Each structure stands twice: as C-alpha cells, then as structure tokens.
Amino acid sequence: MPPGADASSLAAAVLDAATPLAAAAATSRVLDYLARHAADHPRAFFADAFPSLLYRLFVSSASFIDLAAADPALTDLLLSLLAPSGPLLAAAAAADRLALIRFVFPNERLPDWLRLALASPASASASASPLLSARVGSDLHLSIFEYYLFWFAYYPVSAASPPAAPANPGLRSRSRLETWVSTLATTAIRKPGHKPESSLYLKLLYAYLTHFVPTRTPMARTGGAGTLLHRTVNDGVDALDSFARAEFLLHTLVQFWLVGDDFSPLPVQACHALGLHLPPRAHAELSERPPSPGLGDAVKLLVMYLNCCDGRALVDVDARMPSEGLPVWNGVVDKVGFWNPLIQRPLYRFVLRTFLFCPIGAAIKNATQIFSVWVAYMEPWKITQQELDGYAKQQTGEEQDLQNCNMVYTSSWKIYVLSNYLFYSSMVMHFLGFAHKFIHSDVAAVLLMVYKVLGVLSSSPELLDLLHKVDAAYHTTPVASSLPYDDVLKYVPSICEQLKDWEDGLSETDADGSFLHEHWNSDLRLFSYDENGAYNLLQLLLIRAESEILRLSGDTQQALQTLDSIKSLMKRVFQGQIERIHGNTSLEELHNQHQQQVRGEVFTPKHPSSGKSSWADVKYRGEWMKRPISDSEVAWLARILIRLSDWLNDALGLDCGDVDGSPAAASTTYIRFDRNELNTVGGPKDAARMALVALCSVIVLAGQALLKFMRSHRVKIDLRVFASKKLLSAAVVLYGVVTVTRNASG
C-alpha cells in the first residue's frame, strides 16, 4: 500500500478510537507506521495522520491521555510514542530539517493576548514574544515540532477555555487539513470543568523539560531576561538549536499557562516601547473564569524544575564568580538564576488573579492547586532532584514532603528572595483577602493554607529577619548609612517598580467578594500593625474561623489544632515587631484586646441552616455594594443591579465627593421670572404654562440639591437591595393578593 493511502487509513483509525482498547490499537499502528517509514521522511503521515493524532491526544472529549488513566498498557504505548527521543518527535525533527510542511495554529485556541498581538501591526508585535517570530500576516506558521508543543501546552487549559467561535474559513492555511482540525477543536472540546488526568501528562512534561531544558546554564549566559534566541555566543549550531528549542518550549508553556487571558501580559514599559496598545480585559469577564482544573499541578512542576536548574547555577555562581562582576537586572545583582526572570511577573499575576478573581462558589480545590504553586515558588531551597524524579515515578505528594522537610533557607538564596520579595510580602496580603472570602466555604482547607504560608515565613530566623529588614527599608527614608537594614536599601527601588508593574490594572474592588480596600496594598502592609495590616487581618480571620468551626458537625479536632498552630506561628512572625512597637505588650494581650473590639462585629456569613445569622453584623472592609453575594439574594439579579448602580453613580458624578469650585458646584441653575411676562399673562393657558415651568424648575433645583448633598456626604445609589429574595417574595405575594382581590371584586 502506498504511504499516502496508508496514512489516510491510519488517520481514520485514530479518529475512530474512542475506547482504551481502540486507542491502544491505534497507537500501535502509529508506532508501526513510523518504524516502517522512518527513513523516507513520512510527509504523508504529517499531512494526513498527524492532525488526527493531535486531536485525539489533546483535544477530543475522550482524549488518549484521559483514556490512559484507566489503562497502564495504553500509558506505556503513549510514552513510547511521545517520548522526547521517541519515534514521533524524531520523525518531526527529520521533517523539519527539510522544511517538508508547516502548520497554522488556529487563532481561536491561542491565548487572548497573542490573538490581539497578531491583530496589531507586525512591527509592534515582532519583539513582544519569541513565539511571534513565526508570524506570517495574522497567523502563526509553525514547524511540526512547534505545532506539537502548542497543542501539548493547550491540553491542561482547554477544560477552562470558553467556547470558541467556529474557525474562520477565510484564514489562509499552509495545510488543507489545518482548518479541519481547527473545526474539530471548536466542536468537540473536553467538557468544561473536567480535570485532565495528570499522571501521563506530568510524566511527559517532566521528560520534555529534562530533555530540552538544560539543567546547568553556561556561565556566559547567566544574566539577562531568559531570552536565548537573541544571544550571540560561539557554541555551535547544535547548541544554538538546542537552546532555541528550550526557549520555545518554555515561552509556549508560560504564554498558554501563566499569561493566558491576562489583560496586562507584558511589562508596562515594554508595551509602551513596542507600541502595543492592548485593550484591557473586562474584570467581570475574568471573574467568571475559575482556575483550570489540573493546571496547577503542571505549573508547579514547571516552577520547581526551573528553580532547581537555577539553584544549580546559583551554586556555580557562588563558587566561581564574585558578585561585583555579575550583570545587573533592575538594579539587583542577578544571582537568581537564568530562567527566573522569565517567570517572575507572569507567575505573580497568575497567582494573584486566582486569589482576586476566583468566584465565590467555585471549587476551592482548583485554587488550592495554584496556592501550592506559590508555596513551592517561595521555597526553592526545598526542591531536590529526587523530588523531581518522583514525577517520572508518579511519587505521592506525602512522600515528596518527607524528603525536603529538613531543608531551610540559607544566605545563598538571599538575592532570590530579594528579587522575588513581593511573593513573600504583597502576595500574602492578597492571600489573606482570599482567605476571608472563602473561610465559610471550607474552613479546614483555608486554615491549612494559612498555616502553610506562616510556616514558610517563619521557617528560618534568617529569612524572617531579611523580610523584616526589607520592610523597614521600604517604609523608612534613611538619614544615615549605618542603619541595620542598610545592606538591603539598594533593592527597594526595584521592589517599588515591581509592585507598580506586576499589579498593573488589578484592583481588589473589582474582584467578586473581595475583602480588601481599593489600593490597600499600594504600600506593603505585611508587617503593618494598624487595622489594615496583616496582623489584624489574621486576628479577624481566626475569630471568624472559630465561629465557622462551631457550626461544623462531626470531628473538629483537626481544625482546632490547625487554629492553635497558626497562633503559635503568629508569635514567631510578629512577636518581635509587636514588642518593638508596643513595648512589653505580649501577643496574647493584643489578641484579647482585638477580640473584645471585634467580637460584636465579626463577619458572619449567612448559612441556610442558621436563622440567627445576619448580614447586618458584617464588618466588611470594602465597598458595601460589592460585598460577597449571600444566600438571601438572587445572584444574577444582584450582579445586574450592581452594574446598573455603578453606571448611575458614574453618570451622576457620585463616585467623587463635591468640592468647592467643582463643575457640579459651578453649574447651579437659577430661576428667573420676567416681570413683564408676569404682567401680561394672557389667560389660563399662559398661567398653566408658567406654573408647569415653575414646577419643573423646582424639581430641577431639588434634584441638584439632592445630588450636591449626596456628593458632599459620599452617598451612592445602591439598587442591590432589590435583589433580596425576601423583597422579591413579598412583591410576588403582594401582586398575587392584588390580582386575586381585583378578580374577586370584578
């Protein structure tokens, strides 16, 4: 049989494989085909069978990767086929060397900002990302290897992707089958919310990372922003190709997983320099997208692997180079490793967007996966090669924790912590807002997360001392060079720049049910002891947690133990600063004082099983109209009324207070009566007209006075009260009574 006909038959067999047994048979046929045609560069395979294989691997509702979870034999076959040195990627490399075929990745499957960049002029987007170097017009023309990596990266985010529009038939394609595969992808995507099975996928991810991404970066490459294609060193063609593949793989994973639908995908200065003007994403649309199921596990492996690579490079730097001779990144001596600058900003915004925009009612398990990514990023010194190798053996999380529990922070990681200080400070504040938002959903899970965060901060006296020193330097204008935190002062400008750039466009008040004030964290508040500081937020969270635990049925011993452990960790984190600020006042005394102040004002969520709880007792630290939606409200109606109220407040100028000299104050309307008109009233019509004009003028004056009063007292329109189920029920009952009475009287 000719190779072309054989490939067409193979494509049909792959498409028809919807069970583990059929998938195993189809995979065996693919392996056999590649073994028979490996020497003659199977163009027919990549033109006919390859798109069908990708569809069945990463897109279909019964993908081979999902089916492999219940079939070890299928798992082994897929690992043999898809391994970095396996027959599929080997044949792809051979075909790419001869440039046999190019593919166009469907635009509707690209991350949002990449689609927007492709719609902008090529000159503006050419330097925005190495992925855009394959741009031809408004499409990305990819090699076989690159095309495979795009679909591989797309797999874990596809379950959370919104339904895409059908493929545009007008798009020019280099392969006639590409539009066909794109159409299949838009009509047969995996079910939303379905978690991809991570066993096989994580094994493949780890295999690709170890094969394509070097574990030790050459010393000549240890500076910069993680971009390899723009470096000119005499390493030979093979070395450059190897680093180019590593860069393409990592940028693909970062763009699909971390950046995704972020409305600020690039540093603000980079956007201005490139002339990219990307329209901001609507925050309401973001809030409707919970974290993608299963994505957190893949991101965690990526972060751990890159930090492990950088940790090895860090050891080499300490041993072979003095710090004075290292390159500088944003004013910070770059000893954080080669890959870290590539993922800093995307990862920060990825975790922060999860904390801010994870909607109430979403599964907290998905957010917990993202939380574990953050914790792993804060403790790179705990990552070992044995732990990473456990992904290849599918080692359990408990076994991994036992391996690294004794590894703590050392001074060799100081620059890493300083370069990523916002992960240890600002992110903690945002996380506390998330904890208050979800404390009523799963009190045990939230308390365990809080315990882990405080455990990281207090894991080492040296780490805690460094965090305190940077916080003191950040909030103090030094007058002498002998201050105890003088050695960290030079990092403060970089931290200020990062805080402004990494949180660009993100606002707590736009988040669904946010507990935080607007611009609350424009200044770092982790070690602040006023009512907006982390200490008081934690105190209030513990009080709310105690109230929630009392509502639980069954065994609450574990939750109470976690609560006690959190209190002991708070002593480590805050006790030294408490004594410095409040003299000999102990943490327990401040805790008791705080409890007495807020016991009657605790944020107690309304539970269906309790008739005593009331939202009137809520001490909500945010705009009341945007408080979390309670069980006593119609959710969809409340959201509509909130947006309508926002529009009315903006149209009437109620968002800002009235001040002297403002346009509102200068536009007062005066009523003037012409004496001649009063003396020449021609009859009842003229009199009625004048009375109507006078009445309208009085109404206008009263309206202006009311608006001025509302502006001066910062009173806003809040229509959300009409979303109350009780009010709507009363209205329905009243309407029914009126209808019945009218029918009876008629």
Image (cartoon, grey):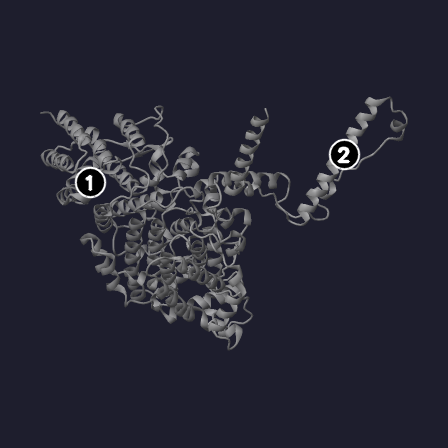
- Seen in the picture, residue 16 relative to 395 is either above or below; the reply is above
Classify residue 349 as left or right of residue 701: left
- Name the front one of labels 2 and 1: 2
What residue do we see at 67% from left, 50% from top?
713
Identify residue for label 2.
697
Identify residue for label 1.
67
Q: Quadrant of the C terminus?
A: top right
Give the crowd class for mark 2: few <14, some 14-19, many >=20 residues within 10 Å.
some
Classify residue 552 as left or right of residue 521: left
What residue do we see at 35% from left, 66% from top?
561
What residue do we see at 61% from left, 43% from top?
717
Do labels 2 and 1 touch, CB within 8 Å? no
Classify residue 527 as left or right of residue 118: right
Quadrant in the rendering for residue 183: top left
Classify residue 227 as left or right of residue 434: left
Tell me the element at label 1: helix
- What amino acid does circle 2 point to? Ser
- Seen in the picture, residue 440 relative to 289 is either above or below; the reply is below
